[in-house]
Image (cartoon, rainbow, N blue to C red):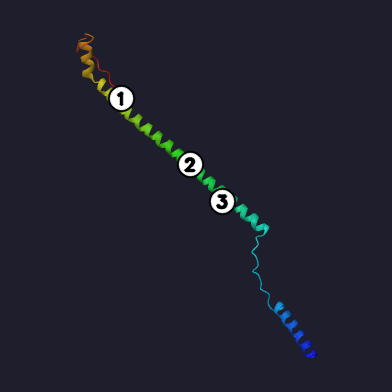
């Protein structure tokens, strides 16, 4: 029996070694980001952030300029209306009938058709 025990033990050692060496569970390799990839990602992020900030700031400037333009257009429109009203008043106030009426009633002048001279324009 002694021999039999010796023959069984080496087999067991071989089986244990086979189990250990057979196929160890391989852990999945961790995905590592290299230094170059990190620098590239950071550089791209900085460029994108800069572009985003530039676009937003330019949009804000355009909005403010458009608002100022609309304000100026409104002021021009109001001034044109005032100018039209004043031109209408000038036309009314410079009518010959009105001038003759003021001259006769308020200043005591009389129209002498013999002394009137027309100047061509």
Quarter of the image that includes the C terminus: top left
Please give the residue where the numbered disc 2 appears in the rendered image: 60
Element type at marker 1? helix
Which mark is in front, 1 or 3? Answer: 3
Q: Residue furthest top?
A: 108
What percent of the width, then of the height, locates residue 89? 27, 23
Residue 32: which quarter of the image?
Answer: bottom right
Which mark is in front, 1 or 2? Answer: 2
- Tag 3 or tag 1, which sits nearer the N-term? 3
Q: Nearer the viewer, residue 14 or 99?
A: 14
Above or below residue 48? Residue 79 is above
Please give the residue where the numbered disc 3 appears in the rendered image: 48
Q: Nearer the viewer, residue 27 or 16?
A: 16
- Tag 2 or tag 3, which sits nearer the N-term? 3
Element type at marker 3? helix
- Tag 2 or tag 1, which sits nearer the N-term? 2
Please give the residue where the numbered disc 1 appears in the rendered image: 86
Element type at marker 2? helix
């Amino acid at each position: 029996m002694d021999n039999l025990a010796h023959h069984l033990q080496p087999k067991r050692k071989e089986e244990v070694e086979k189990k250990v060496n057979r196929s160890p569970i391989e852990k999945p390799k961790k995905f590592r980001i290299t230094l170059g990839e990190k620098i590239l990602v950071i550089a791209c992020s900085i460029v994108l952030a800069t572009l985003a900030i530039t676009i937003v700031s330019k949009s804000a400037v355009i909005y403010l300029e458009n608002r100022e333009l609309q304000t100026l257009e409104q002021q021009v429109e109001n001034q044109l209306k005032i100018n039209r009203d004043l031109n209408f008043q000038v036309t009314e106030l410079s009518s010959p009938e009105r001038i003759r009426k003021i001259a006769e009633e308020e200043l005591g002048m009389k129209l002498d058709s013999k002394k009137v001279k027309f100047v061509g324009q």
